[in-house]
Every structure is written in C-alpha cells, then in structure tokens.
Amino acid sequence: MVTKEQAEKRIEELRKEIRRHNYLYYVLNKPEISDAEYDRLMNELKELESKFPELITPDSPTQRVGAEPAEQFETVRHVKPMLSLDTAMEEEEIKKFDERVKRELGVSEVEYVAEPKLDGLSVELIYDHGKLVRGSTRGDGINGENVTENIKTIRAVPLVLRSSEEKIPDMLAVRGEVIMHINDFEELNKKLIERGEQPMANPRNAAAGSLRRLDPRETAERPLDIFFYEILRVEGYGGIDTQWKALQSLKKWGLKINSLAKKCKDIEDAIEY
C-alpha cells in the first residue's frame, strides 16, 4: 500500500522526468526514450493522481486536457501590443531599412537575427514565476481571446518553465506562432473527409480554427505545434539585450524556437539567408 507521502514524492519525480522528456523531444528534438516508455511514465502518474486526487496540481502534465467547453472566449488585454510584422520584398527595401537602423543607433554595423516566417496564428503566453497562467490570441493586437485551456493541450507548450540552465523570471510574456505542419494538415483533412466533414482550406486556417474550438478536448485532437520568437515583457530577470540572447533564453526555459534561426553578421548575411 502506497502512503500519501510516498505517492507525493513519486508524483514529483514523475512530473520532473516527464517535463525533461518533453523538453528533449519538443525543444531539442533529441528524444531519449520510446513513445511506449513515455506512455508508461504518464500512466503511472495518472494512476497515482487518481488514487490521491488531492495531490493533483494545475501544472501537472496530466492536466493538459480536462476543462469543460466554454460558451465563448473572454477578451483579455495584452501586456504589450502585438503589432503586425512589416514586409519587405525587395533587396533595396531591406538595405534602406538597415541604413535607418544604423542611423538611429549611431553605429556603422548591425547584427541581425533571421528566421523563417511561419504562417499560423500569433499568440501571447504569460508565465507567473514559471507557471503558465494565460494564453491568448493576437486579436486586434491590443486585445485577444483567452484560449488558455486550448493552449495547454499543445504538447510543445511547457506548463512549467525549465530552471536547470536559466533563472526563472518572476513574470514572462512571450509571443509565438501556432501552426499545423503540412503533413499533419493533409492527414487531418483525410480524416475529416472520411467522416463526411468539410476539409480545411489550408494549414493556417486549420491551425486558427483548431485553437479557437470552444471545447479544449477537440483542440487536443488536432496536431498543433508552436514556435516562440519574441519576449514581450520580462520581470525579475536581466541581461537580455539582443534578439539572439532572447531566443537562447527561450530555448533554455523550454520554449521551442525555430532551429533554422541564424545570427547574421550584417544585412548582406541576412539577405543571403
């Protein structure tokens, strides 16, 4: 017979181990165990929590799905306006931008960070002392929809930030892009057609529509992924003075960044990218 004290200790061990494997799989893309072994850890955790429900916490890996369907999404204000990204299609436009930046900063050379622009749904996530407390859509850039329970169902989203490599900030607001990979989109449409349902128009619409389902259990069934690329606000943590440092901190906290991101020595390097 397992005592409550023994269960509490084992539950904490399992949560820590599962979070570590989530980081290895989703952020580093270097899994150490098989899916079957991962499922065994999750099943053991679920069994212990079912025997001792008083030990269940909102940030447990078992609590990604479970909220009741919502009647509508609450409107929330972003901690910082989520502005749309400017587009420059011609090389000359990019070079003019570089000249403006140098002039404003009073420097002769500027390093850039380049990464692919993903076509999905922009979201804001807020962590309070390392725990995910809110997730919202971009909306009009000032206000968005509170989709926290749906965000939690995305396996690549950490419910708790990692603290082994980097100090956890008191408050962290980050911006990311929720997407659906093309192969997952095609597989989803295949299933929808087999069920006699209307297929999705494109991966972007599929990602946006999946995240905005009123029932989180439906969102959990959709193959969503996420990549983070901007720190909107950070409190209780210093030293992030460049975009490259921001990306490295995000990665150390367990927030998935695009592996194709590159630090470019100048605008020519960025254009070549």
Image (cartoon, grey):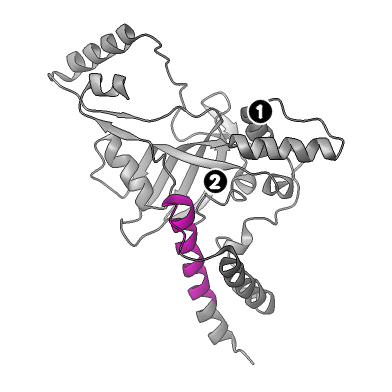
Residue 188 at x, y = what percent?
A: 71, 39
Per the image, label 2 sits on a secondary structure element best described as strand
Q: Nearer the viewer, residue 236 or 161?
A: 161
Q: Is residue 85 above or below residue 175?
A: above
Residue furthest out toward the right: 196
Identify the amino acid type marked 2. Answer: Arg
Q: Is residue 101 above or below residue 142?
A: above
Residue at mark 2: 134
Identify the amino acid type marked 1. Answer: Asn
Residue at mark 1: 205
Question: Most prominent secondary structure in the magenta stretch?
Answer: helix
Q: Residue at x 70, y 40 (%)?
A: 187
Residue 155 at x, y = what percent?
A: 57, 52
Tell me which numbered mark, 1 or 2, is placed earlier along the sequence. 2
Q: Nearer the viewer, residue 259 or 128?
A: 259
Residue 189 at x, y = what percent?
A: 74, 35
Q: How many marks?
A: 2
Magenta region: which residues? 11-31
Q: Quadrant of the N terminus?
A: bottom right
- Residue 20 as seen in the image, left or right of residue 180: left
Residue 266 at x, y = what percent?
A: 21, 23
Per the image, label 1 sits on a secondary structure element best described as helix
Q: Does residue 73 appear in this view? A: no
The circle on residue 251 is none
Residue 101 magenta-highlighted: no
Q: Does residue 26 appear in this view? A: yes
Q: Residue at x 66, y 26 (%)?
A: 202
**Cα–Cα span, label 1 and label 2:** 23 Å
Residue furthest out toward the bottom: 1
- Circle 2 crowding by C-alpha within 10 Å: few under 14, some 14–19, many from 20: some
Q: Residue at x 54, y 75 (%)?
A: 11
Residue 181 placement: quadrant: top right
